[in-house]
Amino acid sequence: MAKGFWIARVDVRDADAYKNYVAKNGRAFAKYGGRFLVRGGAFETVKGEARARNVVIEFPSYQAALDCFHSPEYQEALAEQKGGADVDLIVIEGYEGPQPGEG
């Protein structure tokens, strides 16, 4: 079964509101097996447009990633943000096929 991922690009507009969101979102991520692979950190925009913050969260499956987003726990955390950030977020299924250089 392919893993699922959240890929988010974020511009924080209200640091306090965003802190409230971050303080609550871990409950949902833990319940659905979410694990941060990228959480902020240095980056270089080599093509296209970027936002100030990037996040990648891995889930055990695509369905778990979707279920987490739609869960009451995550929706409660999201309500805490109260418009404190502009976010582009996709939920995407991982790839399990052949990799470059593999027969």
Image (cartoon, rainbow, N blue to C red):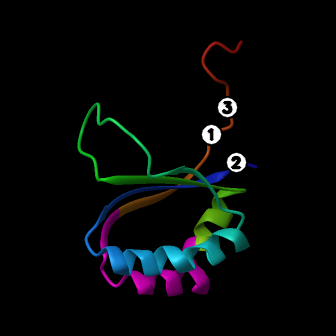
The secondary structure type at the circle numbered 3 is: loop
- Magenta stretch holds residue 80: yes
- Magenta stretch holds residue 54: no
Q: Which residues are magenta?
A: 69-87
Label ID, residue 97:
3
Task: Give the residue at mark 1.
Answer: 95
Mark 2–mark 1 Cα distance, whole angstroms, equals: 6 Å
Give the dominant element type of the magenta stretch: helix, strand or loop: helix
Mark 3–mark 2 Cα distance, whole angstroms, equals: 10 Å
- Give the residue drawn at x 47%, y 54%: 55
**Residue 56's x, y, as percent?**
52, 52
**Residue 82's x, y, as percent?**
34, 85
The picture quadrant where one finds residue 96 is top right
Task: Give the residue at mark 2.
Answer: 2
- Vertical arrangement, residue 56 with respect to residue 95, above or below: below
- Give the residue drawn at x 32%, y 35%: 44
